Amino acid sequence: MLKNSLKIALCAILSFVLIGCAKQEVKNEDSKGKNIVCFGDSITFGYGVSSGEDYPSALAKLVKIPVINKGIDGDTSTEALKRLDSDVLDREPLLVLVEFCGNDFLRKVPKEITLKNIGEMVDRIQAHGAMVAVIDVSAGMFLSEYRSAFHRLAKEKKALFISSILNGIITNPSLKSDFLHPNQRGYKIIAQNIYLAIKPYIEDRPALSPSK
């Protein structure tokens, strides 16, 4: 079983590298920020695992830049906008990973409202001088209606688009803590996929100490 899980994880990473990891034009590549801020809902928060087993914690072990986890379980894009200043803009962001839509979908928030909220987040973060990555949590047919919309939004605003981070996880019980959320190994795969996407934009920067 472990061999099969490893094969699936490696296939997911290889697929991501081949399809989603070409360098895109991203606004604020010269950002003077100090931190990577992971801004999202339960997938970012790390629902289903202990503290330190979430994807931002795994990502922090792969990069030289401090990583801040600002995920809140159950958060919608509308609720997240209310905390954008305190949780993101006040944190000296170099790069912000924006991951929302699952709870919007569950609460029947119209997709147009979700896109408007994500667009406002991207605009405000970029105006603050940081890079933005729009994270897509669709996998196969699951939330597929958001995938192309987020891709268009990211391209239009010159934000990085990181697609389908749950591919290879959501269909594999050995990588999940429940029907949807990853377990520790699943979150490590997400962190690796995100790292491969952001590496070209952060790899030449000096190591930094975490901000207070």
Image: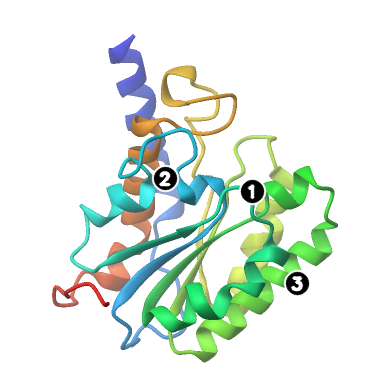
Q: Residue at x 68, y 53 (%)?
A: 101
Residue beneath disc 3: 116
Residue beneath disc 2: 16
Residue 186, position as x, y percentages in the image: 40, 33
Q: Quadrant of the C terminus?
A: bottom left
**Mark whose residue sits in front, 2 or 1:** 1
Q: Amino acid at mark 3?
A: Lys
Q: Quadrant of the N terminus?
A: top left
Foreground residue among 49 and 31: 49
Q: Residue at x 82, y 64 (%)?
A: 112
Residue 138, position as x, y percentages in the image: 62, 43
C-alpha separation, residue under disc 2 versus residue under disc 3: 27 Å
**Mark whose residue sits in front, 2 or 3:** 3
**Mark whose residue sits in front, 1 or 3:** 1
Q: In the displayed image of the protein, which residue is found farthest to the top?
A: 1
C-alpha separation, residue under disc 1 versus residue under disc 3: 19 Å
Q: Amino acid at mark 1?
A: Gly
**Label 2–label 1 contact, CB within 8 A:** no
Q: Amino acid at mark 2?
A: Phe
